Structures are given as structure tokens and as C-alpha cells.
């Protein structure tokens, strides 16, 4: 079942028309399909239901409390990278025992909080972090369960800004140092080694990268076993790609290929397998709805200037990401345009020289595959308030994040008395 369909030539999200939604909610806004999020999570989790697994949604991808609550209801755990994300996961009723804490720079404050909550595992990324964690744990007299995030030195063949598993990346521990660190950790008070962790990057569509990395993790797993180091779980991270453009494989196809890799290796691991998918669950469950403010023809170019800007959606300019853009009302005629925003930056664009449907002033466009890493990365640059998020379930729509107001923004600033 598709949750994003045209009915009478109008884009619908579940049972609601984008035109009606834009009557009720001022543009621009993000809009998610609850059914699609749930379906993607089930697809992923059910694919591995024959194994002993825990699926920890990567909270950084979409941390809206409503989205997290929806996933908590499906049994999801959480992969978090800050105290803020731990608090968000707990507030959405994700049990602490399903939370894994990743990230290269956990602070003492964050460690103490996570220990007091009794989270499942810390994914430790360096020796100094191990030492600090051991001290914090000792002071609190609470044992920390840890994995080391291993950098397996594998090319994820993805955009350079989202590749994390190659030598020289800031993430994880070089695989050559792993045994020594595991032995050190094993000798520390209040540190309990429970796992091995990896995450080699994001938007990975060539599953041989996962295959190579898991193979290396497996060798380490057997070495640790011979040293009697206890491994209760292996965490394969996230990273599976989604379909942004029509000529790319679908998520279902990629999941099938990924599952072949996992199923080939899984029997060798006599322990639980943790996954940290993010993009796969929510990317294609979200769209950004925006309105054309002006259409400007100049120097043989047509600019579609819309009311969303790079502050609302930064992926095209930051990662050269391609997001499909369609008219809310289907058109039969096409033209080449630059779709740009109102922000005073040349990098404020969503598409350059894109052939798309002819859309006029005041008409609505739909920017697709924006349910992951989009709203979470929005900001108020140019004093543009952070926009709303809407969730659609069946024929109901809910505001799940209010748009910021200009007053909200101004009220955060403080003018010292001497300047008044
Ligand atoms: N686990 C860890 C430790 C991660 O760092 C990430 C993502 C994930 C899991 C989830 O990966 P996914 O399944 O979503 O690929 N902002 C960029 C992507 C940054 C990825 C950060 N790490 C973008 O918009 O493409």
C-alpha cells in the first residue's frame, strides 16, 4: 500500500489532500505519514524476526516525540548520541534497556545521566572515553555495559560527508587496536564488556560494504571468544540507503540484499544482533510542502522561488542531495527550472536545472523523501522561524511540532541593561 498517492490528480498523504492540508497549516511545513513510518519499521524488524535482534531507531534522524512514540509502540529501541536524545527517547516511552548510546564525545554529565537511567550499552569510541566512563561509573558505583565501536576500514562508497568506517575518519577504534582495548576494558572496575559495535556510514546502497565490515567484525568476535571476553551482542549500526530518485533501487529491494548479507553471517554470532536504522524508517514517510512565491525568468533561466529555504532543508546544498520535487496538482507539461528559497545565500536551492512540472506563482510543490535528517537539521537562519511538523494518520492530521514564532526567537536574546 502506498501512503503517498495522487487522487484526482492531487497529491494525497494517506487520505488527506495536500491542498486541504495547506489550507489548514501555513506553508512551509513537514508532513509525515504515520502508516508509512509504521510499515517501514515493521518491514525492517520482521525481516529479521527469525533472529535474536533489537532494532534501535537512530533518533538523530527524526526526533519528534510523536514519531518516537509511534516507533516505541512498535517495540523500537533507540540509538542516541546526546543526553537530549536519551531524554527524548525516554519521554516517548522507549525503555532505557533498549537504548544504546553512540557518539565520539560523550561528556561526563551525559555518561552519569545514562548510567543512572541504566541504559543497555555505551558504544565507546576511544581509550580516553573508556577511562572517563570508568571513573564516572566508579564514582556512581554503577557498572557501565560497553561495546567498542570498531572502525573496520571499509569503504562505504557513499557521500564523503557521511562515510564513517574508513581509516582516518574520526569515528570508532582502529580494528588493529581493538583486542588491546577490550583486554584493558575487561580489567577495569565498573566496566562490563558486552558487545561489539560498528557503523560504517549512511545512504549505503552497495551492500558488499556491509559484508566486508561484518566479516572483519566476525574475525574480532572469534578472537575475543578465545580470550574469554564476553560478547552478548554485536551491533551492525545503520546505513542502509533509501530511494531518492526513481532510477535508484527501492527500499524493499535494498533490504532484501542487506538481509542476504545478514543471514549469511548471523548464524556465526551466538549472541543478539542490534541494528541502528534511521533513514530507512522515516525518509520516505515525509514530505516538505512549500508554496511558490515568485517565478522569475532571467538570463535564459527560470527560477521557482519558494517559501521554504535552506534553513528548513539543508540536504541539497550540504550533501548535493537530490530530492524529487513534484507539483501538488499533477501537471502534464514540464520545464527546466532552478528551485530556490528566499534565504540570502547562493547555496539556498533545492534543485538546479531540474526538469519538472510547470508550476505557477502561489501553487504548491512537494519535496519528497524529507522524513529523515531534514526537520532535525532545520534552523532559524535569516530570522526565519523553524517550521511546523504535521503527522497524518488516515483522514486525521495532527500538528506534532508547532512552528516557532518570531516572538519565540526574539525572546531568546537578552539585551543587557546597559544597552537599553
Ligand atoms: N548509528 C550511528 C552511530 C549513526 O551515526 C547513524 C547516522 C545511524 C546509526 C543511522 O544511519 P542511517 O540508517 O540513517 O543511515 N545528515 C546526513 C546523514 C548523517 C548520518 C549520521 N549517522 C544526511 O542527511 O544524509
Image: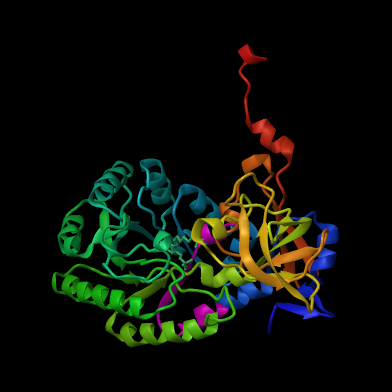
Where residue 229 appears, as percent x and y from the top left, is 19, 67
Where residue 295 appears, as percent x and y from the top left, is 77, 57
Where residue 12 appears, as percent x and y from the top left, is 77, 74
Q: Is residue 384 magenta?
A: no
Instruction: Using the image, determine if residue 16 lies above or below residue 386.
Output: below
The front one of 73 and 415 is: 415
Q: Is residue 60 magenta?
A: yes
Examine the image and state in which quarter residue 92 appears: bottom right
Q: Which residues are magenta?
A: 42-63
Task: Report the quarter where the C terminus lies.
Answer: top right
Q: Residue at x 31, y 43 (%)?
A: 136
The front one of 241 and 130 is: 241
Q: Residue at x 26, y 78 (%)?
A: 215
The front one of 347 and 71 is: 347
- Left or right, 38 with respect to 227, comes to right
Examine the image and state in which quarter residue 20 appears: bottom right
**Residue 75 visible somewhere in the drawing:** no
Task: Report the quarter where the N terminus lies.
Answer: bottom right
Q: Residue at x 36, y 48 (%)?
A: 105
Amino acid at each position: 500500500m502506498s501512503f503517498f498517492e495522487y487522487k484526482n490528480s492531487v497529491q494525497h498523504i494517506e487520505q488527506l489532500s495536500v491542498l486541504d492540508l495547506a489550507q489548514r497549516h501555513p506553508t512551509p511545513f513537514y508532513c509525515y505519514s504515520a502508516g508509512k513510518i509504521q510499515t517501514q519499521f515493521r518491514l525492517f524488524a520482521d525481516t529479521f524476526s527469525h533472529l535474536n535482534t533489537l532494532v534501535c531507531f537512530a533518533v538523530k534522524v527524526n526526533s519528534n516525540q510523536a514519531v518516537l512514540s509511534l516507533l516505541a509502540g512498535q517495540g523500537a529501541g533507540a540509538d542516541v548520541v546526546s543526553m537530549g536524545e536519551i531524554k527524548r527517547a525516554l519521554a516517548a516511552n522507549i525503555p532505557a534497556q533498549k537504548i544504546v548510546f553512540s557518539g565520539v564525545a560523550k561528556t561526563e554529565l551525559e555518561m552519569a545521566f545514562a548510567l543512572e537511567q541504566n541504559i543497555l550499552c555505551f558504544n565507546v569510541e576511544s581509550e580516553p572515553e573508556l577511562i572517563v566512563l570508568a571513573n564516572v561509573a566508579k564514582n556512581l558505583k554503577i557498572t557501565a555495559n560497553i561495546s567498542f565501536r570498531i572502525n573496520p576500514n571499509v569503504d562505504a562508497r557513499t557521500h564523503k560527508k557521511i562515510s564513517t568506517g574508513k581509516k582516518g575518519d574520526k569515528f570508532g577504534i582502529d580494528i588493529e587496536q581493538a583486542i588491546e582495548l577490550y583486554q584493558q576494558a575487561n580489567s577495569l572496575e565498573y566496566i562490563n564488556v558486552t558487545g561489539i559495535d560498528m557503523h560504517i556510514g549512511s545512504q549505503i546502497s552497495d551492500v558488499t560494504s556491509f559484508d566486508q565490515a561484518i566479516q572483519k567484525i566476525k574475525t574480532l568476535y572469534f578472537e575475543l571468544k578465545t580470550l574469554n571476553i564476553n560478547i552478548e551482542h554485536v551491533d551492525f549500526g545503520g546505513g542502509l540507503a533509501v530511494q531518492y530518485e526513481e532510477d535508484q533501487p527501492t527500499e524493499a529491494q535494498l533490504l532484501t540484499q542487506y538481509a542476504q548479507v545478514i543471514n549469511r553471517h548471523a548464524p556465526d554470532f551466538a549472541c543478539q544482533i542490534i541494528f541502528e536504522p534511521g533513514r530507512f524508517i522515516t525518509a520516505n514517510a515525509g514530505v516538505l510542502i512549500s508554496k511558490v512565491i515568485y517565478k522569475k525568468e532571467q538570463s535564459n533561466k527560470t527560477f521557482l522561488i519558494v517559501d521554504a529555504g535552506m534553513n528548513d532543508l539543508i540536504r541539497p546544498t550540504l550533501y548535493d542531495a537530490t530530492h524529487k520535487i513534484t507539483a501538488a496538482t499533477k501537471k502534464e507539461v514540464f520545464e527546466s527550472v532552478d528551485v530556490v528559497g528566499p534565504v540570502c545565500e547562493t547555496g539556498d536551492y533545492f534543485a538546479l536545472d531540474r526538469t519538472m512540472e510547470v508550476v505557477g506563482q502561489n501553487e504548491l510543490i512537494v519535496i519528497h523523501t524529507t522524513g529523515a535528517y531534514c526537520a532535525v537539521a532545520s534552523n532559524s537562519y535569516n530570522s526565519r522561524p523553524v517550521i511546523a511538523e504535521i503527522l497524518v494518520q488516515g483522514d486525521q492530521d495532527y500538528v506534532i511540532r508547532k512552528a516557532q514564532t518570531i516572538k519565540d526567537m526574539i525572546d531568546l536574546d537578552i539585551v543587557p541593561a546597559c544597552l537599553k
